């Protein structure tokens, strides 16, 4: 956070004119500091990096980086931030602040911090009112620098992207629930595109069992006509589907051996990124020159301001482009990782699967789509889609009529 005003400053005594000139000067001073890349990082509370030998440089602390990578891996393997925090606390691994108790929020912030993928965003926030100490999110009032590959990365960009994706998935699946079922956020209603939710039937009795149905099923005026599925039957269906994949294992591997490089080729994007980087560098030099002039000079500040704004506008467009390109490259990398991880997972499976295995499901399935005709489509992590008919434990859509079931209405589309 930036504190731009001096201490002991008394606003009541200032005339408007003076006040304006102070704010203009501090703005220039502030701009200059960002341009110089002065990034403040609280190293003592930051896991994985220490101050490098040169000013502004970040160096990896390998013993800490191991913990950061472990947090990312465990999250991707399906653990919740709560599980991860609990385990780290149990193992008495010191927190970033050298304490003993790991908080869920610490894990979450580590999973979101773009510095671990080697990027830096300077100037996310700034102080707008020193009296009330309010700070504001930078929404373009000051230049915001997104610097890809600013320092050595602890987390590969592809893995970072996968974690952000997984975060979105879990959030949509039910926020910060500490106990997320393996199916949460992975079963999609083909009718409305929403997620299936879990519900217990006959709770407390010996007949109790978990069922899944579209979360919107009973909320909308137009009811979704997708079926309710018994949890065991989803598991059973997955076993059948993965077994059909296992029997085609060598064919799938041979296909990818032929096309994996082509479908994950990022060389055109890399070339574009290089061009953008070059132009960015040129504009940065121009901006820096203006900043040096602007922070010293009093005359002609309007003209300098105007040129500064123009360069800045161009710079921002380029930054945006740079961010898009680097994210596209990251996604291609993520795709490659997903496919190779999927193939590795298949390799591990010796013979057909007999019982449902959560870990295999987690490692191989992106999501399941449920159609109203009681078929499901498994979308595997490599992108393969497989349609399957659920045999048991399916309750088709039934139109409700004041407490009793109208059996003739299974194909009804409207409840009016
Ligand atoms: Zn639905």
Image (tube, rainbow, N blue to C red):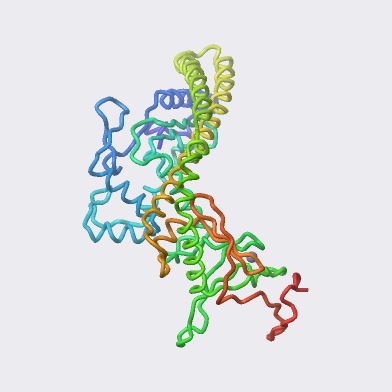
Q: Nearer the viewer, residue 302 or 190?
A: 190
* Residue 192 vertical placement versus 321 (above, below): below
* Total number of numbered discs in the rendering: 0
Residue at the spot 53% in from the left edge and 28% down from the top edge: 268
Residue 15 visible in the picture: no
Among the 4 quarters of the image, the one containing residue 102 = bottom left
Q: Quadrant of ligand 1?
A: bottom right
Q: Nearer the viewer, residue 181 or 59?
A: 181
Among the 4 quarters of the image, the one containing residue 4 = top left
* Residue 89 vertical placement versus 413 (above, below): above
Quadrant where the image shows the N terminus: top left
Residue 276 visible in the picture: yes
Left or right placement of residue 101 versus residue 231 in this view: left
Residue at the spot 49% in from the left edge and 52% down from the top edge: 381
What is the x, y in percent for residue 231? Answer: 50, 73
What is the x, y in percent for residue 400? Answer: 70, 80
Q: Nearer the viewer, residue 118 or 98?
A: 118
What is the x, y in percent for residue 371? Answer: 64, 65
* Residue 265 vertical placement versus 208 (above, below): above
What is the x, y in percent for residue 45? Answer: 29, 44
Residue situated furthest right in the rendering? 416
Left or right placement of residue 123 versus residue 68 in this view: right
Quadrant where the image shows the C terminus: bottom right
């Amino acid at each position: 956070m930036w504190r731009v005003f001096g201490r002991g400053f008394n606003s009541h005594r200032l005339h408007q004119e003076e006040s304006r000139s102070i704010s203009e000067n501090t703005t220039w001073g502030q701009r200059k500091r960002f341009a110089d890349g002065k990034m403040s990082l609280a190293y003592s509370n930051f896991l994985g990096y220490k101050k490098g030998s040169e000013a502004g440089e970040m160096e990896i602390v390998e013993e800490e980086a191991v913990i950061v990578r472990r947090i990312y891996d465990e999250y991707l393997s399906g653990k919740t931030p709560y599980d991860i925090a609990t385990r780290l606390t149990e193992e008495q691994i010191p927190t970033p602040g050298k304490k003993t108790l790991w908080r869920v929020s610490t894990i979450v912030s580590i999973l979101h911090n773009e510095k671990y993928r080697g990027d830096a965003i300077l100037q996310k926030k700034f102080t707008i009112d020193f009296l009330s100490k309010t700070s504001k999110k930078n929404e373009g009032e000051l230049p915001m620098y997104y610097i890809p590959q600013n320092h050595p990365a602890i987390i590969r960009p592809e893995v970072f992207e996968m974690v952000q994706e997984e975060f979105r998935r879990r959030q949509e699946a039910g926020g910060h629930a500490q106990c997320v079922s393996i199916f949460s956020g992975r079963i999609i209603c083909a009718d409305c595109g929403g997620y299936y939710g879990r519900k217990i039937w006959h709770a407390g009795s010996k007949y109790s069992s978990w069922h899944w149905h579209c979360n919107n099923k009973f909320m909308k005026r137009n009811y979704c006509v997708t079926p309710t599925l018994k949890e065991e039957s989803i598991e059973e269906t997955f076993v059948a589907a993965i077994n059909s994949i296992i029997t085609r294992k060598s064919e799938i591997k041979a296909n990818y051996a032929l096309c994996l490089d082509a479908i994950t080729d990022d060389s055109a994007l890399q070339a574009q990124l290089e061009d953008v980087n070059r132009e960015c560098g040129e504009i940065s030099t121009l901006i820096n020159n203006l900043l040096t002039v602007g922070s010293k000079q009093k005359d002609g500040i309007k003209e300098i301001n105007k040129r500064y704004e123009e360069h800045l506008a161009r710079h921002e467009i380029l930054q945006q482009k740079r961010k898009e390109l680097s994210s596209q490259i990251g996604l291609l990398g993520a795709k490659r990782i997903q496919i190779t991880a999927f193939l590795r997972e298949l390799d591990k499976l010796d013979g057909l699967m007999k019982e449902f295995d959560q870990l295999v499901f987690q490692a191989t399935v992106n999501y399941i789509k449920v159609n109203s005709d009681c078929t499901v489509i498994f979308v595997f992590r490599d992108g393969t889609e497989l349609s399957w008919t659920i045999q048991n434990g399916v309750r088709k859509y039934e139109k409700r009529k004041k407490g009793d079931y109208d059996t003739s209405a299974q194909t009804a589309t409207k409840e009016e």
